[in-house]
Image (cartoon, rainbow, N blue to C red):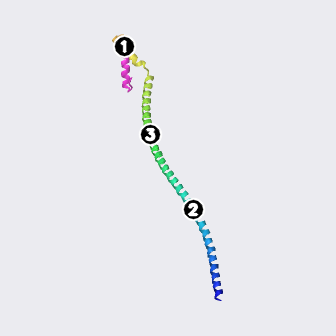
Amino acid sequence: MSHSLGIAIESLVAALLMLTIAYCMLLNKRLKCLKADEHSLKATIGELITATEIAERAIGGLKLTVRDVNENLRNQIAAAGSLSEQLDKQLAEGDNVLRRLSRIASAARQPAAEPLAHAHAQAQAQALSPAKAVAAAAQAFAERRRADGIAA
């Protein structure tokens, strides 16, 4: 009986060893899958790190571009302000020239014969030569224009 008890125990141990070997094979298979998943996870993490580095470089480039655009825009705004001031000055000067031209045109519309007649009468009264009479008339005309605020 001791012999059959020994065989039973040995058989039981052999069966347990077989179960252990089968379980180890199952664990080995699962560990291989886990290692494969680990490698794919490492590859995914590596790709994510690479994408993150590329994104960081792109963000740095965008920041530089924004700074450049901001500086360029600031310069263009300053240039536009300067140009606006120049245009305002030129418009004011144009208005001044237009007012002066209007005064000259209105003065030209007035009868020009009146100062000439007055100068001619003075010349005849003084019995001056014709050249002196023309000079006196021109002088009277110039004095009249200066009195109106228009330089002749």
**Nearer-N-terminus badge (1/2):** 2
Residue hosting label 3? 79
Hey, what amino acid is under mark 2? His
Q: Position of residue 72 (x, y in %)?
A: 46, 43
Residue hosting label 1? 133
Given contact means CB atoms under 8 Å apart, are the residues at marks 3 and 2 in contact? no
> In this view of the protein, which residue sits in the foreground, 82 or 122?
82
Q: Look at discs 3 and 2 and give the one toward the viewer.
A: 2
Q: Look at discs 1 and 3 and give the one toward the viewer.
A: 3
Indicate whether 143 appears above or below 77.
above
Task: Report helix, strand or loop for mark 1.
Answer: helix
| Residue shown at the point (59%, 68%) measured from the top left | 31
Estimate how packed mark 1 is, as few (under 14), some (14 to 19) or many (20 or more) residues with alpha carbons within 10 Å: many
Quadrant in the picture for residue 111: top left
Estimate how packed mark 2 is, as few (under 14), some (14 to 19) or many (20 or more) residues with alpha carbons within 10 Å: few
Q: Position of residue 57 (x, y in %)?
A: 50, 51
Q: What secondary structure predominates along the stretch shown in magenta? A: helix
In the picture, measured across the screen, residue 120 lies left or right of residue 42, that is left
**Nearer-N-terminus badge (3/2):** 2
| Residue shown at the point (36%, 25%) measured from the top left | 147
Tell me the magenta residue range.
Answer: 134-152
Indicate whether 74 appears above or below 128.
below
Which mark is on residue 109?
none
Task: Report helix, strand or loop for mark 3.
Answer: helix
Hey, what amino acid is under mark 1? Ala
Separation of disc 1 and disc 2 at Cα?
116 Å
Estimate how packed mark 3 is, as few (under 14), some (14 to 19) or many (20 or more) residues with alpha carbons within 10 Å: few
Task: Report helix, strand or loop for mark 2.
Answer: helix
